Amino acid sequence: MKCPVTVTLLLLFRGVSAAVRLQAVLPGDIMIGGLFPLHEDVERNASFAPNIPQCVRLQERSVVRALAVICAVQAVNAAPLMVNANLTLGLWIQDSCSDVGTALRATEEFTREGTHCPQNTTAANTTAVNTTASEHQDTERRQPVMALIGAAHSEMSIAIARQLTLKMIPQISYSSTAAILSDKSRFPAFLRTIPNDLHQTGAMVRLLSLFHWSWVGMVTTDGDYGRSALDSFLSQTAENRICVAFKSILPGSIAHQNIHDEIRQAAVTIYNNPKVKVIVSFAKPTLMRYLFAELRRQALAAGDSVHAVRRVWIASDSWSSMNLNEAEGIGHVIGFHFKMGNTERFSRFLSRVEEASGEREDTDGSPELKRFYGRLKGEEGDVLGRILRQELHTDAVFSVEMAVRAIAHAAVKLCQEQDCRTPGAVQPWQLLRALWMEEFELGGKWYRFDQRGDINLGYDVCMWGIRDGGNIHETVAEYHPHNRSFTSKNPGANNPLRLLKNIVSRCSNSCEPGQFKKTAEGQHTCCYECINCTENYYSNHTDMDQCLSCDTDGEWAPGGSAACIPKQEVFFCWNNAFAIVLLVLSALGIVLALLTSALFLHWRETPVVRAAGGPLSQVILYSLIVSFVSAMLFVGRPNSLQCKARQVLFGISFTVCVSCILVKSLQILLAFQFNPALQDPLRKLYQPYVIVSACVAVQVATCISWLVLKSPFNRVINKSTTLLQDCHEGSYIAFGVMLGYIALLAFVCFVCAFKCRKLPQQYNEARFITFSMLLYLISWLLFIPIYVTTSGVYLPAVEMVVILISNYGILSCHFFPKCYVILFKKDKNTRSAFRKTLYEYTSKSTGSISSSENGFVSNSADVENNNVEIKRGATPGCTVSCTGPSQDSRRRRRLRRSTSI
């Protein structure tokens, strides 16, 4: 007797509870095992004796997957792929009841040698309470199970994968996502048609990052799946600066003795963390229903509305498509679904099943299958009707269909090379090899398992809500694992994800740019204070852990800055108001010097010009012009040539000027103040141009040595907020020697001129020299402490001011009075006027000398005698033996010689 061609159902149930363990068998050439959690849990008892626990609460989503397997196997058997190969797939579905122990018993039956087909048994004559397929004696041998589709939960898949690995029976899961199952060294026979949890947790973390949710809670179940998901999620959140505020680990089974306490504690934790607005959950659907109900109860017990426990729930694939009527008011639910395919064929299949009755033949001619469908419609509370009226869980259908198609293509390839109908001719490991190597087709697309046994198609992101009293599962986006990106299904203003943009889930407020996070010891890194960045540090993004340092060579930043500010290059620039004034004064000085030079050339034969020095006055004027030009070089961006030229030009030009003034001072001193006995030898030593050349040569040698050994150069002084372009004098010793040498010449001029300060007005160069040199010495004495203590942009201006004071002092004292006489007092610019003044001065001077030599005169006769002597040309105070020209005549000649050189 052969096994029935149609599906044979074995329905075993307990009393009136409708708690049954469902099985279904469809014989074929290549047998496939199917393990589905058709029930939600099992009833536990305290007995020490081994027994088979009873299944409780039918799961509609798992029923959909079981029906999808039946539909897929029937479809593939009718497809040209299998028809042309003259091959059929068989199916044996067992119920794991969401229990690892039950799943292991089912797997043992799948792998038992010499397994038998269950006898056809109707529900009416099944009366034993704890009856299993092994208790039926009327059975026959059948083909061994070559592959297994299942299990649903990762914990079960891990357990049965170890068992199946012993015989290398390929296992293809449709919803087990634990990352550990991708380890082929431990689970070489495990495959799956979905991504693993590494991608799902990565998608969740990416979603949290996009909405800047850094303070989240996590709810998961105890066991391999929950622990694996937790570890994967925590590792990825740490890399993305997301903190898990709390972790609530619920028991894996609702029959656990502390289940209610654990759920209550999880609800209290959520309620007591109001800042945690986002919660990620990998829990089972039933546990989430209980948790939502407890959250509502907690809020009402505390006197709050249900809005107090509103959260954004990030749902894993394990519960994202469950019936969420119990979750009304608890917030938004964002679920991650596996990719969905075309479900038209499955919808037609369900319609046929829903129309089938227990007495009529269905379109497939399978009366046992009709009785199974009848059980789902009748005693199970019309499960088929609810499935049809609600969502079909198309992601579950698609992943199951992929598993069936993969086995079909591998079986066809394998059976083309050897006989598959003889029991034992084909081994499971051969089918496993074909599954790894062969591509398979579904819906016009081709797929292949990757090196880890996964098929990674990404996820559909759905958002759950209640509208018009019904559940809404709307697909809002698609996640692409290869680049960790989301593609919005409705990028317009009606996208439901826009409702989440204003939700803030953070332990601390964001630190603005210009601040950094300071975390207290022992706190989460997401709980912090915001501290302003210190000077020269910045932060240019929100929530930075530390401030970044500015490149202080060219940047700076005030405290609390979001960016570095380039340091401004500063120098005594041309458009500076003070610089403009000084430049105008320099230019005016040049013009005045040129005009004075022209005026003196025009009136060069007049006594005033001759008394001013004659040709030497032109040398002084042109040296002043060079000095004014050197002052202009202190303005503008300094360069190396400019730094060298400005000091050297001033030093040499002003040395020429002061040397000429020194010659004039010596000339006057020789004419009026020296002892007559020294006149002739000093007159021989008095060589004006030689003196000027010698004085200038010393300064030239000093400047050349300065330039050669350690010359001035341009530099950049790095200030706190600016870059000061400046000239460094190279050797400040050489700089001091240059200025000191000029000061020495000026001091000699001052001393010589001071001795001759009482000359007549037309000849009184000495008083002007005294005043100009005194002004020079005072200005440069003030310059030294100011220059030493001053820094910054206006340091060049200090020296420029002193140069202008010195130049204008000489112009004003030496030339402007003479220009005034030339232009406005022409009557005094004649020889007769000068002779008259000379005679008056010598007469007065002679009388003074006579009085000083002969003592005070007691009567008018002595004074008269002296006057007579002067008129006669005699030298007052001389004895009879005196010879040569009189003293006053010699004075007049020296004075006249002093007026022209």
Image (cartoon, grey):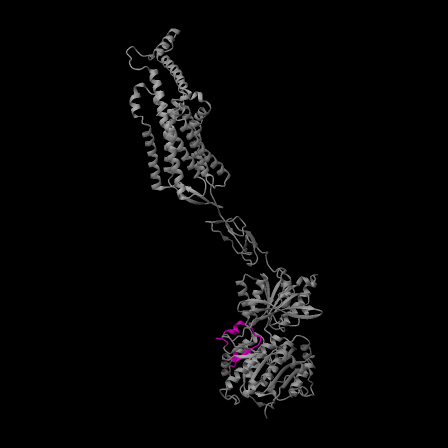
Residue 99 in sight in this render = no
**Quarter in which the N terminus is drawn:** bottom right
Q: Residue 836 falls in which quadrant of the image?
A: top left
Q: Which residues are magenta?
A: 162-187
Residue 287 position (above or below residue 683):
below
- Residue drawn at (50%, 76%), measured in percent from left and top? 187
Indicate whether residue 563 is drawn in magenta: no
At which x and y percent is residue 202?
55, 67
Q: Residue 362 falls in which quadrant of the image?
A: bottom right
> In this orientation, which residue lies closer to the viewer: 826 or 260?
826
Indicate whether residue 180 is drawn in magenta: yes
Residue 32 in sight in this render = yes
Left or right? Give the position of 717 relative to 484.
left
Left or right? Give the position of 124 relative to 694.
right
At which x and y percent is residue 565?
51, 49
> In this orientation, which residue lies closer to the viewer: 828 or 329?
828
At which x and y percent is residue 316?
60, 70
> In this orientation, which residue lies closer to the viewer: 343 or 403?
343
